[in-house]
Image (cartoon, helix red, strand yellow):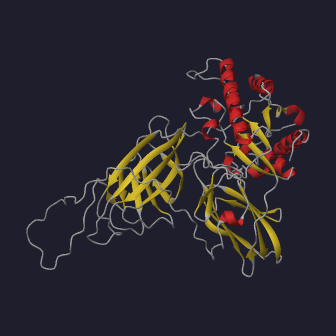
Amino acid sequence: MRLTRSRFRLAVSLFATATVAATAALAGTAPAQAAAGCRVAYAVTSQWPGGFGASVDLTNLGDPLTSWRLTWSFSAGQVIDQLWNGTMTQSAGRVTVTNAGWNGNLGSGASTQFGFGASWNNSSNPVPVDFALNGVPCTGRTTSPTAPPTTTPPTTTPPTTVPPTTAPPTTAPPTTVPPTTVPPTTAPPASGALDQTSTVGRVKAVGTSAQYTWPGIYFEGRFRGTGVGIVLNDSQNDYVVQIDGATVATLVTPGRTTYWVRNLTNAEHTVRLVKRTESPWAAGEFGGLVAASGGAILTRPAPRSRQIEFIGDSWTAGYGNMSTTRDCNSNGGVTRNSNADVTFGALTAQSLNADYQLIAWSGLGMVRNYNGGGTDNFRTYYETDLQALWNSTTWQNPGTWKPQLVVVGLGINDFSTALNPGERWATIDQLAADYRTAYLAFLDKLRSRYGADTFIVLTYPDLSPTTALASSVQQIVQTRVSRGDTRIRSLYYDDNALGLDKLGCDWHPSRRDDQLLAGALTRFVNTLPLTW
């Protein structure tokens, strides 16, 4: 049997940090003779083979600015792939970041933050050099304004430097969340996004908008009229838009926009917005709904009584499931070929008329990530609201998320690749022992969160030639049952019996496979004595 492969993506907290103080007269932005200065805090927040994530905090120490441009140079060949909360250009090692539409105004002492994902050479990732704000090098002090001359200036040579009038700051830059509300292109919604729509996903309210990172997050709303606008601010993710249950659009990295669905029958309609893709280091943002002229946004739909939580890795997230070829280099890549809305989890929940969460991250395992990479694992991030984003915190369950069923699929990344020299396990048996211990502790956490009545199903696929995953999951269930936990089961996905083709990117389940997996899981769930 073929080994299942998963893409490795891992965050390593605070690999490196650096703070740079900046000051100078800001030519072209601040008025002549204006006080000027800034502080930059640069932090590598995560790093993995071939890539890293970083955050940049910019604090204006001088007079107010209405726009800004921050430049720096990479010295080891780093290349930025994506950036949020600003606009980026890069030429060789020289990087220029300008403000987004909403964060250009920086008052005295005000801060803004942006972040990015980038590649590196796996050897050296030094802190950037020569930060400059609006073209002026950073020196670490704030200059003060001087009154313009009212008489002929003296002929003596002026001083070549200006002594600072204040001491350089000694405290870290503020860490408040930057304003991230979306200025809609039409009249704003009557109320916030979370007031207008129903969602059970892990979202963070920011003003009237909602931010999120986990795959498959969805928002459901109702409106009356001939059209609806969907307010978005997201240059990283892809979305599905559905009206009355039918898909009407796929939005590819829509950016800051209000997407309109028009020319509908003048009646009551439902609208559903779904995040198709993964973005552990970049938050999407939904700003709400806007009714077409003459229409209205109606009361949001009631939540469903059934709830299912799916916990897993790339299989659960829908990694490359829309592809019909395992090599996705020539057909748009993994992200363009991923759709969390047609994963086996989403399809199972929809067939059972249940609300659901997909708490999944490609490449992460219970104790060991794909090919042994990194030190953090899935358990590091399970409880977070925005995964590895710089302002992520523990998700606060509003009290409405009480799943009657939790389906866990973790272990493919732990066991699908051979152990490498230098890993902390010398044998597969040692790895399996750690896996079982960690899994049992994770199940204790789930029981504590959701209570004794929630059914938990541990799934595992064919992972020949090793039997370590299968035997470990079976032992875990037996151990739990021996301790009195009667609402736990295991489910084996047999490749041959199900007829999986694994034509998704990098040997992952295809869309057809997801349908087959959903059928198997739904049939199994229907045998459980669930109290919905």
In this rendering, is residue 391 above or below 191?
above
Quadrant the N terminus occupies: top right
Q: Nearer the viewer, residue 217 or 326?
A: 217
Q: Nearer the viewer, residue 237 or 273?
A: 273
| Number of numbered tags placed on the structure image | 0
Residue in the foreground of this view, choosing between 91 and 415: 415
> Is 5 displayed left or right of 302 in the figure?
left
Quarter assignment of residue 197:
bottom right
Q: Closest to the observer: 98 or 366?
A: 366
Left or right: 500, with 219 as reference point = right
Q: Would you say residue 465 is visible in this rendering?
A: no
**122, above or below 419, in the image:** below
Image coords of residue 252 (percent x, y) = 67, 59
User: Farthest residue in the left direction?
Assistant: 156
Quarter-of-image position of residue 456: top right
Q: Is residue 156 visible?
A: yes
Where residue 381 appears, as percent x and y from the top left, is: 61, 41
In the rendering, at what x and y percent does residue 321 appear? 76, 46
- Which residue is most to the bottom? 294
Locate residue 213 relative to residue 77 in the image: left or right.
right
Instruction: Report which quarter residue 290 is drawn in.
Output: bottom right
Give x and y (percent) for residue 454. Answer: 79, 40
